[in-house]
Amino acid sequence: MANPMNPRSAHDADKAENSLVLSFVSVRQTLGYIGYFLPFCLLVYGLSGKGRFEASISDFFYTSMGGILTGSLTAIGVFLLSYSGYRRLPGERLSDAWLARVAGASAILVALLPIGRKGYPVCPVETQPICWAFGAHFHPDILHYAAAITFFACMALFCLVQFPRGERRADGRLQWTGRCVTYVACGIVILAAMVAIGAYFIADPDLKAHMVAAKYLFWFESLAVMAFATSWLVKGRALTSLRRIVTRHSN
C-alpha cells in the first residue's frame, strides 16, 4: 500500500490504478467492437450475392467467411480469458474473473467445435490427427451447442449481475442509471434470444423449414451477440472515449 505521506509513492499507486482502469476499458471496448463486427460482416456477405446467406451464424463456418467467424470467436475468447475485472467482495458468489474465463473458454470451443454439415466434413481424412489436436474433429453437435449456451448464459449473468454492481450506492441499493438500465435490457434480450433459439430445436419439421428459410436462427443469434456487444461497449464507456477523441480533434 502506498504511503500517503510520500508523494512519489502516491503517484506510482495512482499511475498503476489508472493503467489498470485503462486496461479494463480497452478490453471491454474491444469485446464490444468484435461483437458488432462479426454479425455485420456475415450479414454483408450474405446479402452481397457473393455467397449463400446461411441459416445461422454457425453455418457460415462452411463459407469463405469461416476464417472471420473462427477468428472473431477466438479473439473474443482470448480477450475474455485475459479479463480479470473486479475482485469478488465478501458475500458475492460470482467473480468477474471466473465468469470471464468460463465465457472465454466457451467462445473458443464454439469456434473449434463447429456444427456438422452433411457433405462438408470438418476435417479431411489426411488432416484428421491435426484436427483432433485442435478439437475440430468429428464430434457430436451437442458440444457446439452446449458451448454456445454456456457463452450466452455467462454474458447474460454479466449484464444482469456483474455489470450493475458498479451502479450501486454506498448502502448497496441499485441506482437505475441509464447505464444500469442498458445492462439489464441487454441481459433480458440475451435470455429472450436464447429462449427463441431453443424454440427452433423443438419445432415440428414443417415449422422448422419455414424458420430456416427466414434465417430465424441467424437473426436471433445476431440479436444476442449485439446485445452482448452493446453491454460491453457501455461498460467500457465507448461513447465517452469517442467524445474525448472528437473534442480533442475539434479544438
Image (cartoon, rainbow, N blue to C red):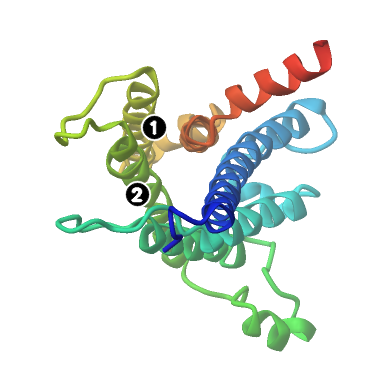
Residue at x-position 53% and y-position 26%: 214
Depth check, mark 2 against mark 1: the one in front is 2
Q: Position of residue 171 (x, y in %)?
A: 14, 34
The residue most toward the top is 250
**Residue that lies at the very extreme toward the front in this rendered image:** 5
Whole-number angstrom distance, CA of label 2 to CA of label 1: 26 Å
Q: Earlier in the sequence, mark 2 or mark 1?
A: 2
Is 197 drawn above or below residue 145 in the view shown? above
Q: Is residue 47 above or below residue 235?
A: above
Kind of residue at disc 1: Leu
Q: Quadrant of the C terminus?
A: top right
Q: Which residue is depicted at the point 26% across and 20% down? A: 176
Q: Residue 169, position in %: x, y?
A: 22, 30
Residue in the foreground of this view, choosing between 176 and 17: 17
Q: Tell me if residue 115 can be seen.
A: no
Quadrant in the rendering for residue 137:
bottom right
Residue at which label 1 appears:
207
Q: Quadrant of residue 33?
A: top right
Disc 2 crowd, CA 10 A, few/some/many (<14, 14-19, 20+): some
Helix, strand or loop status at disc 1:
helix
Where's the N terminus, which quadrant?
bottom left
Q: Position of residue 16 (x, y in %)?
A: 57, 55
Q: Position of residue 140 (x, y in %)?
A: 46, 70
Disc 2 marks which amino acid? Ala
Identify the residue position indicated by label 2 in the image: 153
Is 150 positioned to the left or the right of 247 in the image? left
Residue found at x 75% / y 26%: 47
